Image (cartoon, helix red, strand yellow):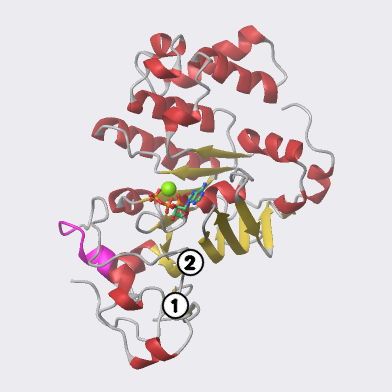
Amino acid sequence: MTSEPEAWPTTVSDPGGSPTTGEPLLAVEGLSARYRTEHEAIDAVRNVSLEVRAGETLALVGESAAGKSTIGHAILGLLPGNAEVQADALRFRGASLLELSTEQLRLIRGDEIAMIFQDALSSLTPTLRVRDQLSELFLAHRDIGKEEAEAQALEMLSRLLPDAERVFDSYPFQLSGGMAQRVMITLAIALEPRLIIADEPTASLDPSVRMETLQILEQLRDQRGVGILLITHDFGVVARLADRVAVMYAGAIVETADVRTIFKAPRHPYSFGLLQSLPGAHREGRLQPLRGQPPDLSDLPPQCPFLPRCPKAVSKCRLEDAPSLELVGDEPGHLAACYNPMVVPIR
Ligand code: ATP
Ligand code: MG
């Protein structure tokens, strides 16, 4: 590892070996993000708090435009110029990401926190061969020469690709979506980060590669204690990889619980609807759109944003401001933002 930001080692607390005690790897408190366009302000993320511990996976699930990718990008300071971000706290290993310089954040990205981007092909640098993108990463973050960097890069790529040598000498435009995704994953895990933000990591992969990719993420989590913030529409991926789940609707977390509880006894009518719409007894597969339209994020009402689509709405939902997350049910850490939560387990 090369130069670390000066303030970094002194402010960082021990990540801790136990997944359930001590300082979380990542702590997000009261995060909001708003995009300004010529005509409107879009409240993409509203007052989101979450934690990811060493050795655990938190899955963020929800329909398209729920604000999932915006959270991932906000954590890494990667939102575009028209985004305004506010947060009470964004901490990684106890140190505030909000107080880091652009250079310090750049060093942490890749080295300590890696992101697998949703759109792999356009996240790769188009003018650089895979060989150069990968070995530059090793050169920038490790104290090794070009030859060694290339050797390590190729070795890493071979773990995910049978024809790694051919891909190594390709430019991104010569790759299929699945190949580009695997290069992206290689880039993300190359430096053995402590936290991986994986945005739809398997969306463009065929089933066998999808399984291999999940296995790699699972091994990183279980054997190296990597924390994973998993963003996905795919409940098969959630079932396989998640320890805890946060369900997002219109920029906010509306329910959170351990994965078993979410699958068996979701309490928010939105989570219930999502799971109910999944095919098959194991509730695997991608989310099906629910009846009705998600709300206009540039003009959210004070009431619960799910109200117009909610089969369980009562008069309190129409009369009062949106509910906040409260403990529900018997499971510890099971929270839902709902005045009239479901009481029946899922069929
Ligand atoms: P998907 O599942 O489709 O990837 P998502 O949950 O990741 O969706 P985001 O990409 O975070 O959703 O987008 C949240 C909202 O912010 C959407 O309404 C989207 O159109 C809007 N948005 C995202 N990026 C921008 C931008 N650069 N400028 C304006 N609005 C944006
Ligand atoms: Mg997204």
Q: How packed is label 2: few (under 14 Cα within 10 Å), some, or many (20 or more)?
A: many
CA gap between label 1 and label 2 equals: 10 Å
Q: Residue at x 75, y 26 (%)?
A: 2
Side (left or right) of 48 relative to 168: right
Give the magenta range: 273-281
**In the image, what residue occupies the spot 36% across and 54% down?**
64
Residue 183 in picture, x, y percent from top left? 45, 25
Q: Amino acid at mark 1?
A: Ala
Q: Nearer the viewer, residue 173 or 58?
A: 173
The spot of residue 331 in percent (x, y) is 42, 76
User: Which residue lies under the disc numbered 1?
Assistant: 337
Kind of residue sitting beneath label 2: Ala
- Going 44% across and 44% down the picture, which residue do you hit? 199
Residue 24: in sight, yes or no?
A: no
Q: Which residue is mark 2?
A: 252
- Residue 115 vertical placement versus 141 (above, below): below
Which quadrant holds residue 211?
A: top left
Residue 182 image position (x, y, % from top left)? 41, 27
**Which residue is found at the position 54% from the left and 40% from the top?**
224
306 magenta-colored: no
Residue furthest left in the image: 280
Q: Is mark 1 within 8 Å of ligand 1?
A: no
Tell me if residue 68 comes above or below residue 306 in the rendering.
Answer: above
Front residue of this view, candidates 71 and 240: 71
Q: Secondary structure at mark 1?
A: loop
- 256 or 80: which is nearer to us? 80
The correct choice, above or below, for 219 with respect to 59 in the image is above
Element under disc 2: strand
